[in-house]
Amino acid sequence: MKAAPPAYGLVAEFASDQLLVDAARRARGAGYRYIDAYAPFSVEGLSDALGFRGDRVALITLVGGILGGIGAYFLQWYTAVIDYPINAGGRPLHSWPAFIPATFEMTVLGAALAAFFGMLILNGLPRLVHPIFNMPDFDLASRNRFFLCIEARDPRFDPGETRAFLDSLEPMRIAEVEAR
Amino acid sequence: MTPATAIPAGPVDESRLPVLKGVYSYASISDKISDIVLTRPTHWGWIAGFALCSALLLLFIASIAWLFHKGVGIWGVDIPVAWAFAITNFVWWVGIGHAGTFISAFLLLLRQKWRTSINRFAEAMTIFAVAMAGLMPILHLGRPWFFYWLTPYPDIMNVWPQWRSPLVWDIFAIGTYIIVSILFWYMGLIPDLATLRDRADGRVKQIVYGLGALGWRGEARQWRRFDTAYLLMAGLATPLVISVHSVVSLDFAIGNTPGWHSTIFPPYFVAGALFSGFAMALTISIPLRAVFGLKDFITARHLDNIAKLMLVCGLLVAYSYLVEIFMAFYSGDEFDQAMVLNRMRGPYAPLYWTAIACNVVLPQALWLKRVRLSVPVLFALSLAVNVGMWLERFVIIVVSLHRDFVPSSWGMFYPTFWDWAILVGSLGTFGWLFLMFVRFLPAISIAEMRKLTLEKREGG
């Protein structure tokens, strides 16, 4: 015997970015906490309306840059002073000004790799399969439509009440999305 | 009052020279750009260009194969001129890449809205140009299969790279540059690949673009982290691009050859790099907008702005030329003086004067608005600057080497067929990669253009 597939959430479709921001703000005001908003471009104020703060990408980037720089300087110092010292015209082995270019480049590289992969990992990407893709016409989320999803795991989620709440936002349509 | 609103709109008349022409909605702008890749039949201009570039790509591969078989003796290089075409090509190609990073990173940090429709292909230009550049020193190595000896790795010979050598700095600079450029470009592509995934009709296209999009959903938190990471990458790429051509210039400036041993080299090379890069951006964007019908997105305003930037960089380059000449005489160094006079009157003088004409004299026409708004003239000027900047590097490298300190060791460099084949072949390969890019990936950032249509509608 198979149970009906569990719901992932209720999704409402909007025509503009401002409607979506308002809807997100009101959904949060109504006490919902597991809200997702999907937009074809980066809408200003949308993540704030969802109560999202501190994306941590900057911190990860800083750490990556510091690690890259320290690693590169240490490598140069270790190889030039300890492991493979060469007397080049009596110059000091620890000739730090000559170590700066590679240190700088590796700082940038470390930070850039951290920014890129940090962004991907925090965003949970790559993830090719996601319940939201079950939403009919969700392909428009990358074109000209704006979607607000209230997830079923939200403590305040109730199929009837949440649908009524979404209805009050006057979306273009509402659909229930299955969890798989 | 925020600083952004305190700045006046400037002398540019937005109604006469708009960043985006016509009326577009999110849907129509998405469709217009993605249809180039997905549905629009291939333009004859693309096919003709692709055929030509494919032939040159084959020539490039054949020349490399012959080079690896016979060695660098197939080129005209010898003592005293052991650096010639390959290194000239290297500096020229890296320089071209720099304008792409300038457009995508500097202008993002400066909140220049006109960058939006040109940053994607400018970044692609960077990647392909740096790829060509990165090949050149490797081809130039006598034993190219040992190129990885430049990198620090624990080998059984217990040898480490010489960290005081600019050639080692170079591999770090170029390596970092190409990796960061690819990450920056790909990151910007992710939301657009999602658009292509959602709009593609064939299964194969959906899977290929879908894999590239990594499952991007456009969720608000994803966008937020994406924006932060993108801005940080721009902030990182900005000093990086300056460091890269500075390091390239140190390859020369740290040597004591007359004409190389000069402290002005790092800023001089960075200005020259941007100069040639803006020229290449014009050379590419003018046919691109014609062939793909993108004149609404790459408008006269863009060409005008790139032309202005080209003029500024050209003036910096001209100033550097003057300083070089002045310093040779002011310093009292007779070898430097001989080098300057040899450039002007020696056996390579016609190349020097052609470079001066292309880089200093002709670009002065860009002071005139009529010239900046005339597409054919701009295209011709951009070609002239490309040629001039290649010649400038040739003059710096070959003319300095062919007559250094001891007259008994002077010599001449004459290019062979294979020298030309590598240069022309790399141009063809660059063009081939670029044509593939515009056919299979969105040449304009769709997600950012949606935002631009929004701002235009709101009058922002």
Image: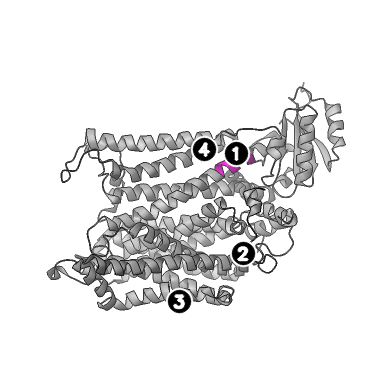
Q: Nearer the viewer, mark 1 or mark 4?
A: 1
Residue at mark 1: chain: B
Q: Which residue is mark 3?
A: B362
Main secondary-structure element of the magenta-colored stretch: helix
Neighbourhood count class around disc 1 (C-alpha, 10 Å): few under 14, some 14–19, many 20 upward: many
- Asked if labels 4 and 2 touch by Cβ distance under 8 angstroms, the answer is no
Neighbourhood count class around disc 4 (C-alpha, 10 Å): few under 14, some 14–19, many 20 upward: some
Q: Earlier in the sequence, mark 1 or mark 3?
A: 1
**Horizontally, is A167 left or right of B301 in the view?**
right
- Asked if labels 4 and 1 touch by Cβ distance under 8 angstroms, the answer is no
Q: CA distance from mark 2 to mark 4?
A: 32 Å
Q: Which mark is residue B225?
A: 1
Residue type indicated by callout 2: Ile
Magenta region = B223-230
- Give the camera-side residue of B237 and A90: A90
Q: Which residue is mark 2?
A: B298
Neighbourhood count class around disc 3 (C-alpha, 10 Å): few under 14, some 14–19, many 20 upward: some
Judged from the image, the secondary structure of the residue bearing numbered disc 3 is helix
- The residue located at (41%, 40%) in the rendering is A107
- The residue located at (32%, 61%) in the rendering is B87
Residue at mark 2: chain: B
**Residue A137, horizontal then vertical, whole percent:** 76, 44
Q: CA distance from mark 2 to mark 3?
A: 24 Å
Q: Which mark is residue A117?
A: 4
Tell me the quadrant of the picture where the N terminus of chain A can be found: top right
Residue type indicated by callout 4: Phe
Q: Quadrant of residue B443?
A: bottom right
- Let me know if residue A91 appears in the view: yes
